[in-house]
Amino acid sequence: MTSEDSTTPRPRRGLIGKRQAILDGALTVFARDGYTRASVDAISAEAGVSTRTIYNHFTDKAELFLVVIQESAEQAADIQIAIINRHLREVTDVETDLIEFGRDWVAPRPDSAAHFSLVRQINAEAGHIPQEAIDTWQETGPRRVRRELAGHLQQLANQGVLRIDDPDRAALHLLLLVSAGLPTSHTTLSAEKITETVTAGVHTFLYGHLHRSNTPGHE
């Protein structure tokens, strides 16, 4: 091995690994402490890297938070969109399929727990978080998911199953109704309680949106 070989920079994989460690550590700290209280020192300790390494990858805490919320929201949205497609791509019985969708939607998901802890922190201190980060989170996560759900609801309307004037609003109503009354953390709730809540929400949604020709007793 030549002296030149011995001084060859480390592979980019090492840099990527450090960047991911920073993002993982930052998500943990931001989700636990919120944006305002989180410090770069705490993030460096959680990530197992120096503060200098963090600043080599990110300009400041604001940029780091922006990247964290964008990537975290994208991953959570991917999971939620998969749920939507799994239950609503081919609807055979609108009530049954919406209830199954709702049960899956509100089920606790450990793989997204840190993200939704972060969302709760954002909601609690929205006035102290850079607006760009909030807009990025909304567009990458909730709005993207709602557009996907709205598209499926619009298809059901096109098929004459539902009556929908505004698909995006209908999607928002459905998401709110299936989780109405459930605590933010409902890991201890029984399956029966979750089913009861979801079923009531779906019935309320269908009361307002089910096409009259699909209503029992309609002639």
Image (cartoon, grey):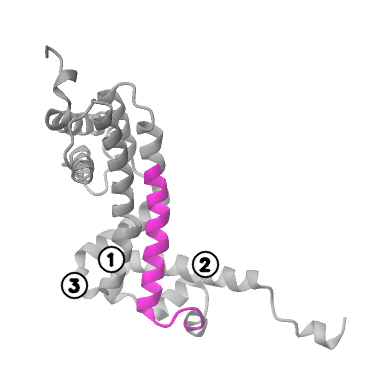
Quick check: is 74 in the magenta stretch? Answer: yes
Depth check: give the residue in front, 33 or 165.
Answer: 165
Residues shaded magenta: 55-81
Q: Position of residue 195 (x, y in %)?
A: 25, 30
* Lateral position of residue 16 relative to residue 126, left or right: right
Residue annotated with mark 2: 20
Most extreme residue toward the right, as rendered? 1
Residue 132 in sight in this render: yes
Three-letter amino acid code of the residue under disc 1: Asp
Q: Residue at x 35, y 58 (%)?
A: 140
- In the image, what residue type sits under mark 3? Gly
Q: Main secondary structure of the magenta part?
A: helix
Between 185 and 161, the residue placed more toward the observer is 161
- Residue 45 at x, y percent in the picture: 46, 75
The answer to which quarter of the image holds residue 91 is: top left
Under tag 1, what secondary structure?
Answer: helix
Labels 2 & 3 near each other (Cβ < 8 A): no
| 2 or 1: tag closer to the N-terminus | 2
Q: Say whether disc 1 or disc 3 marks the residue closer to the N-terminus.
A: 3
Query: Which residue is painted at 81% across and 86% down in the image?
Result: 4
Pointer 2 and pointer 1: residues touching (CB < 8 Å)?
no
The residue under label 3 is: 127
- The residue depicted at 33 percent of the width and 44 percent of the height is 148
**In the rendered view, would you say 58 is above or below 196?**
below
In the picture of the structure, the residue carrying the numbered disc 1 is: 135
Identify which residue is drawn at 45% across, 79% down.
Answer: 58
Task: Give the percent coordinates (x, y) of residue 159.
Answer: 28, 27
* Viewer-closest of 105 and 195: 105
Front label number (2 vs 1): 1
Q: Secondary structure beneath disc 3?
A: helix
Q: Residues within 10 Å of mark 3 (few under 14, many from 20)?
A: few
Using the image as rendered, state which of residue 46 and residue 83 is in the foreground: 83
